[in-house]
Amino acid sequence: MEVISLPAKKIPQAASVIGEAFLNEGFTKRMFNLRNKQSKYLFTKAMELKISIYNKLGQPMWVTIVDDQVVGVGVLKEYDQKKLPFKDILKCILPLIKLTPFLFRINYRNLNTLKRASEKPTCIESPHATLEALAVHPHHQGKGIGKLLIKKIHEEASKKDRISGIYLFTSDEKNKTLYEGLGYNIFQERNLDLITAYHMYYEFSSSS
């Protein structure tokens, strides 16, 4: 088992792992029904496009590899994300058009509540990075892969002087416990009828 920077050729595998891991993730399952085969396929393709764009932008992403297969993914968004060159924007148009049916699979009744729950608080220290995704394939959960990825993310992100810490949010109690055990603190908890969101922060200056 090893953690490496995400190679471009492994992007489809990484997107597939996110699709499998997010089947029961709190926000995702209230926004989409990923147990529907077509919805899951479109969600995975949307993740593949997003990861491909992040790869072109040089955003840091890591994967855990077992027997040459991606089993875990960590996606970090830096505060000073570059803009995508125009030629690459053009290349995204056709994939985006192909994803249009996904718009009809969103649970719009929950959209406003989920937006309120997930909106980033304005009180976070800047500059910081955002942990956009941490996913471990269900067949490999409980083996310490998530912790391994987080530790790698901390190690690499802490080398950048301009980043003071890492922000994330989650609605899952299991994930909240995992992050707390790795040094994240809850600085805002939002309890809504539909969901409870935990906004958490890992500060390098006091925790690394």
Image (cartoon, grey):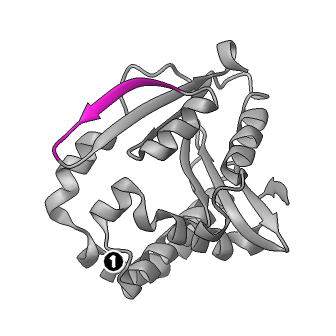
Give me the residue at 33% from left, 42% from top.
118
Question: Overall secondary structure of the magenta stretch?
Answer: strand
SS assignment at label 1 = helix
Q: Is residue 171 above or below residue 201?
A: below
**Region of the chain picked out in magenta, as a range:** 185-193
Residue 50 within the segment the image draws in magenta: no
Residue matched to label 1:
102
**Quarter of the picture holding the N terminus:** bottom right
- Depth order, front residue of 20/205: 20
Quadrant of the rendered image containing residue 23: bottom left
Return the residue nearer the eye: 189 or 83. 189
Name the residue located 50 percent from the left edge and 75 percent from the top edge: 44
Q: Give the farthest residue toward the front.
A: 142
The x and y percentages for residue 138 are 58, 67
Q: Residues within 10 Å of mark 1 (few under 14, many from 20)?
A: some
Horizontal and vertical percent position of residue 161? 73, 22
Q: Where residue 174 appears, x then y in whole percent? A: 48, 45
Residue at x 67%, y 74% (from the top left corner): 13
Left or right position of 92 against 112: right
**Which quarter of the picture shows residue 150?**
top right
Q: Amino acid at mark 1?
A: Phe
- Vertical comparison of 49 with 57: above or below: below
| Residue 205 left/right relative to 121 | right
- Vertical side of 196 occupied by 189: above or below: above
Image x and y of residue 54, in percent: 61, 57
Q: Is residue 144 above or below residue 160?
A: below
Is residue 79 something one can see in this rendering? no
Number of on-image labels: 1
